[in-house]
Image: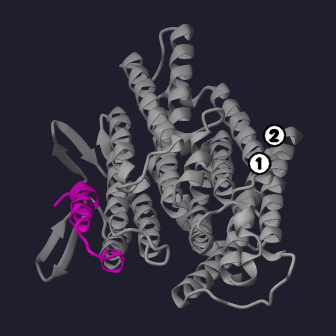
Amino acid sequence: MSAPLIWVLFPLGVGVVLLLAGTTRGAARVGAGVAFFLAVLAWRVPIGQPVRLIGEWGFRITPTMHILGRQLVLPEAARPLLVWIYLGIGLWLAGAVVARMEPTFVGLGLGLAAMLVAALAVRPFLYAALIIETAALLNVPLLSPPGSTAGRGLLRFLTFQTLGMLFILLTGWMLVGTETSLPGSDLALRASVLLGVGLALLMGVFPFHSWIPMLTEEIHPYASALVITAVTSMVGVFGLMFLERYTWLREAAATYQWLQVVGAVMVVVGGLLALFQRHAGRVLGYGILLDEGLALFALGLGGREGVSLFFALWPARIAAFLLWALALSGLGRRRDGLTYRTLRGLGRSYPWLTAGAVLAPLAIAGMPWLAGFPTRMALWQGAAALSPWLLGALALGSAGLVGAAFRLLGVLTIEADEPAWRTQEQFDERVWMWGLIALVAILGLFPQIWWPHMTSLFQWFPHLTG
């Protein structure tokens, strides 16, 4: 029994079967159950070591699997990453019922998680670009259900993913045999530029970010938020693998300086543009952009601190964007749209959905006592040690997103005739809002619960964190 068989092929097969499900509730129970089972399995069962069951009976999970002439490798150090990937996708699949998604959403979501794990496991690791491109193509039914018309955001997403794959493959061809050193500065410059552009296209880094708010505007917020956060998170880990593999890239000071500057610019762009939007879906997209900028800035800090902070952003990302997407799904379903004009005054009838739609961006911005605050505080301290300009950029972007959250609060609660406050959410919506709001608060108030688990994720990158 091999780890790739358990954490890649098994969920991929279950996802294919779930495409035939007749109801979202039944599919969500199976899909979320499988995801949670895989998360618990990764948490409790070691890879590459014998596990005794009863007496002399036992088993051993091998880290390697050969398929189509290539290797899929999931070592012992990958277990913490597998836990968080499948824990996160399990929560998203369980919430599909509340978001009133189509039954096929669950199978496609579980398949997406399996494909992204395969992208991290494949050797040679440059084949990950091809797997990410395949995952992007498989996202088309998820982002554009049968009968709907593909919008500009989806077309731009596919275009940028394809171009990014080509840049990554071209970079890999140039860097064959240059893991420790490069024979000339010209080759280093060309390879670095191509790699940077390729990763920027895949992640939606400024100025290639336009597809992110377009997707969240045109497509159901629950589906678009899942796809964007999952793909960009895994592409970020893919970028870490480049730093881990190529010594000359890892030891170049310019690499970290560029990550700091680009990350700070993305935080500013995401926060300020969110403030001036008139569509709640686009605000969600710019919130994702800001969170991506923080991840890049964390990597720019370098060493164990930077990698630890990069992964420490994940709990808030999972909880806050799940809360945000669920809340917008419920609000948009009541008025058949997420423009501010259609949402005006809706919060007086749906206060818990309103609370979720406002608290989530505040958590991403780093408001105290919410999920994003501990990591944002650490990033702000790192920025202050580097440059007051970087600290000012991070603060400005966060302030912009805070302003966008309060602007949305005003739109949802202020109406000319001021109707009476009442709660009209369905019971399952209220339960999920209560649970996710509590989770966002717990993550912010008690970071000692989850912080040690996130910092253990750097074990997969010994050269970066050594």
Front one among 355 and 178: 355
Quadrant of the image containing the N terminus: bottom left
Q: Is residue 19 magenta?
A: yes
Q: Residue at x 62, y 71 (%)?
A: 335
The image shows residue 51, relative to residue 302, as above or below, that is: below
Q: Residue at x 30, y 70 (%)?
A: 45
Spot occupied by residue 362 in the image (x, y as percentages of width and height): 75, 66
Residue type for callout 2: Leu
Q: Main secondary structure of the magenta part?
A: helix
Quarter residue 33 falls in: bottom left
Picture colour scheme: one colour
Front one among 222 and 338: 338
Q: Residues in magenta?
A: 1-27
Callout 1 crowding tier (Cα within 10 Å): few <14, some 14–19, many ≥20? some
Q: Secondary structure at mark 2?
A: helix
Regarding residue 466, the answer to whether it shows in the image is: no
Q: For this view, does 263 lie left or right of residue 9? A: right
Residue picked out by circle 2:
386
Q: Are marks 1 and 2 in contact (CB under 8 Å)?
A: yes
Q: Secondary structure at mark 1?
A: helix
Quarter residue 57 falls in: bottom left
Rendered image: mark on residue 382: 1
